[in-house]
Amino acid sequence: MNPVESALASQCITLLAAGMLVIQLLMVVQGMLLTNIRLFALQSLMLAAIAAIIAFFHNATHVYWVAGLTLAQAVATANYIGAQEPKKIILTRQGESAALDAKVLFNGTDIPLEVGDVIELR
C-alpha cells in the first residue's frame, strides 16, 4: 500500500469511527427500542464500511464475510416495523430453535450467525 492510499484509508476509517461514536451517544440518550434498532443498523453499516476499507487496502477478502455475520446486525437491518417492539427473537440453527430475549441482545450481547440460520422476530 502506497502512502497516499494509506492516508486515504486512515482518514476514511477515522471519519467512520467518529460517526459511530456520535451514533452511540444518540443511542444512550434516547430510550425508544425501535429507534435504537435503526441507529444500531446505521452503526453496523459504518462498521461494515470500516471492515471493507481494511479488507480492500490489505487485500484480505475473508474480512468481508466475517464482518457481516452477527445476529445483532441481522436484527438491526431487518427493518422491523411492527405494531409493538419485538419481545422475543427465535434463532433456528440446524432444525433446533432457541428463544432469545430481545432486551439482552440490545444490551450488547451478540451471537454469531452461521450459514442457514433462520431468525424470527415476535
Image: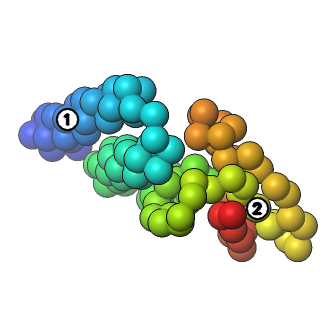
Q: Amino acid at mark 1?
A: Leu
Q: Residue furthest right?
A: 96
Q: Position of residue 98 (x, y in %)?
A: 85, 57
Q: Position of residue 2 (x, y in %)?
A: 16, 41
**Residue placed under numbered mark 2 in the picture:** 90
Q: Residue furthest front?
A: 83
Q: Earlier in the sequence, mark 2 or mark 1?
A: 1
Residue at screen point 81% across, 66% down: 93
Number of other residues with Cα within 10 Å of mark 2, as a class: few under 14, some 14 to 19, many 20 or more: some
Residue 113, picture quadrant: bottom right
Residue at screen point 71% across, 57% down: 89
Residue 119, picture quadrant: bottom right
Residue at screen point 57% across, 58% down: 84
Residue at screen point 90% across, 67% down: 96
The disc label shown at residue 15, or none: 1
Inspect this view and state whether residue 105 appears: yes
- Locate the C terminus by quadrant: bottom right
Q: Secondary structure at mark 1?
A: helix
